[in-house]
Amino acid sequence: MSARPVVLDESIAFVTNGRLSSEQTHALDWLRQTCTATSIRLSSLAEANLSEYSALWWHADTLLDGAPQFESEAVRSALVSFLDNGGGLLLSLGAVEAVSWLGIEPTKPDVLASTSPDSDGYLRSAVFTDHPLFDGFDESLRVSVNSTPASASVRYDRWTPQHADVLAARFDPDTDTDHPDQKTIFEWTRSDDSGSVIGIGQSFSFSTGDDVTTRLAENALRYVTEVDPHSAVGRPKGRTEFTAMRSAVPDERHRPAYHFTPPANWLNDPNGLVYWEGRYHLFYQYNPAGPYHGTIHWGHAVSDDLLYWEDYPVALTPQPGQSDEDGCWSGCFVDDGGVPRVLYTGGSGQDQLPCLATSEDDDLRRWEPDPKNPVITGVPAEADVLSTVDWNAEFRDHCVWREDGSWLQLIGSGIAGIGGAALLFRSDSLREWEYVGPLDIGDWRVTGPVWECPEFVPLGDDYLLHVSDYSTVVYFVGTYDDQQFDSHTHGVLDNGNFYAPQSFTDDDGRRVMFGWLPEDRNRGAQWDAGWSGAMSLPRRIKPGPTAHPIIEPASEVTLLRGRHDGYADIRVTPDGSDYIETSGDTLELQVTIDPCDSHEFGLILRQSPDGSEATQIQYDRLHRTLTVDRSTASLDTRANDSPQSMPVDLTEQGMVELQVFLDRSVIEIFANGTQCLTSRVYPTRDDSVGVDLFADDGHVRASLEIWEMASVWEPNKRTERP
Ligand code: DQQ
């Protein structure tokens, strides 16, 4: 950071709540060198003529707790009117606590400490890299702050403010560790016409004369004194805000162009999938505070065609003091005789319990949590549900259906010492449930100790149960009668980066599934990207000639096809390369390979001209295995380079037939209609877009159809629908 003279042509009031501490004296000295500064006691704010100042700065190096002035209504309304008249406010350290008292923020900060950590710094959000608060900072998202003397810290760790933009969390420079959940710099705007509020809860000390602190203070004061600062969005509500958010974290090399991704920040499981009043609704596990799993809300997107999605406002928000205060976890849609409801898991402390919410609009925009939440108040005593360090009882995620005039519900769980389980409940009202018993229990040595996200749906004459066992989505097909399920067939829904799927039926009776495609690069890389998690393409699940379900991309996906290249009957040998002229990173490929006398052969994607980056999709004929070899997929060591494999038999004609969807970091492979493997790759080079075929021995004959796929997102330059 370069030093520059600091001059603010503003008159700023420095608010104190008593005798100045040494830290406050240093801060006020700095302010006096920076602008016209006046010190005002908080208790006299109601009598002061605040219109003389363009901003107030309240810098409290101790907690506000118990300060009598903090309770004064006259002071509160003086501050609020100041803001409403366009005045700016900088709250630092202990003073950040005042946001809830001022009515700026309904969720109170949950960390109020009278000391700050020895080693400290900021972890800036990738969404707000252009925020004027960081003018003059270099591009790094990790900012070290030199020696921070003991002073109060105020943060949101467990919770996330509802109306703030989270500009930075905490970074520990000594151990080089990110703490994305320790949120510490915020911006609030009370209303469209009011001034801005910046809150800096930690590592903001003037006693040490740190450059970062003075630069931040100058930027913050300049920003809040601007006549028309950018206003904080908090939770985006409209198209402009969502588009701005998506544009802020384009990550063009890796962010999918035709798969659904969150506007920014974190996405995991699909939830509450439904075709309602003629539109598809995709809710999803969403953290608005950053690209990491925490403070889980329900995001919402709507589509007419399963391809082009419109972002809708957040549907469910954790409510402090309620049974979902720590997160609104996965759940399903329930059509209660035409009334749209969702059943989801509320997290609170170490409890996870089912909660109900209802929407009263056809658009499913607004959701009201039920006053009777949680609708099941504890796990069934007779079930011996597993308890772990994280949870009193592993008990979450819901699948609800109507049967013989009753509601039936499955909840994911685990039985101590035995294995993952899907527990069955019955209800007449959705608000009171009786335990029926386990629909199915696995063996923990095979399918893990806990089953998440169970879903139970008809499949032809049979039923399909699928569960996510922390690593894989396993399915069981069997018969169902009198609330008893007997499985006769099992398999894996996808052999790669695919988890917690959910499905729904549309008006045509098609069963369509989405799954979460988790990232496969480390957390630091996800933070830097500013977004995390994608949805799979819509997949149709249907009965096939065997007991295994057929899994194929929904037919709508073909609508994204653009330019087409076809390559017929190519002879591929170990001596050759450059068989394919088409290149790109958003493609659909249909490959048919006759193995001839070769044992190992396949397709190469995202190859750089010098070969330093390439992902091989390799078929091993001896072991009848398809492997995505990621050992050279990326030069970035933060990306997982381990191989991913699945069993694939040759077709009746002795061929390998693959349908592959490449969408930047996503590779979704469908083989023979029943086997899927989704992989994630993160090439670093712009020219890693080559496509090729290879044979390691002998020769193969191959045909290839390739389509360029349209982008469905504006920041990716949305193309016209083909
Ligand atoms: N994700 C949710 C849980 C579920 C898990 C939390 C599966 O409800 O068990 O975000 O990814």
Image: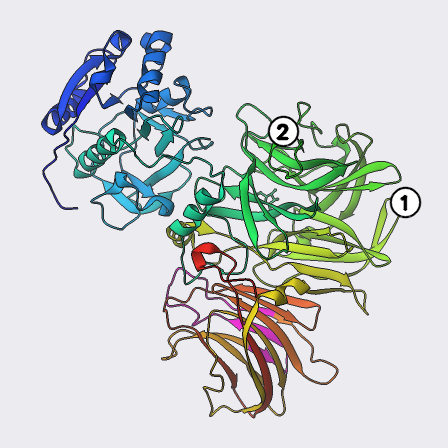
Q: Quadrant of residue 9?
A: top left
Q: Give the residue displayed 44% in from the left and 42% down from the top.
A: 241
Q: Give the residue displayed 76% in from the left and 62% down from the top.
A: 542
Range shown magenta: 618-645
Q: Which mark is residue 454?
A: none
Q: Secondary structure at mark 2?
A: strand
Residue type at numbered disc 1: Asp
**Going from the N terminus, do you reach mark 1 or mark 2 first?**
2
In this view, 633 is above or below 126 = below
Q: Position of residue 511 (x, y in %)?
A: 74, 56
Select label 1 or label 2 by which is in front.
2
Residue 498 shows in this picture: yes
Say few, some or many: other residues with alpha carbon within 10 Å of mark 1 (under 14 / 14 to 19 / 20 or more): few
Q: Is residue 619 magenta?
A: yes
Give 522 or 175, whichever is nearer the viewer. Answer: 522
Identify the residue under disc 2: 368
Q: Secondary structure at mark 1?
A: loop
In this view, 174 is above or below 254 = above
Residue type at numbered disc 2: Glu
Q: Quadrant of residue 55?
A: top left
Q: Which mark is residue 482?
A: 1
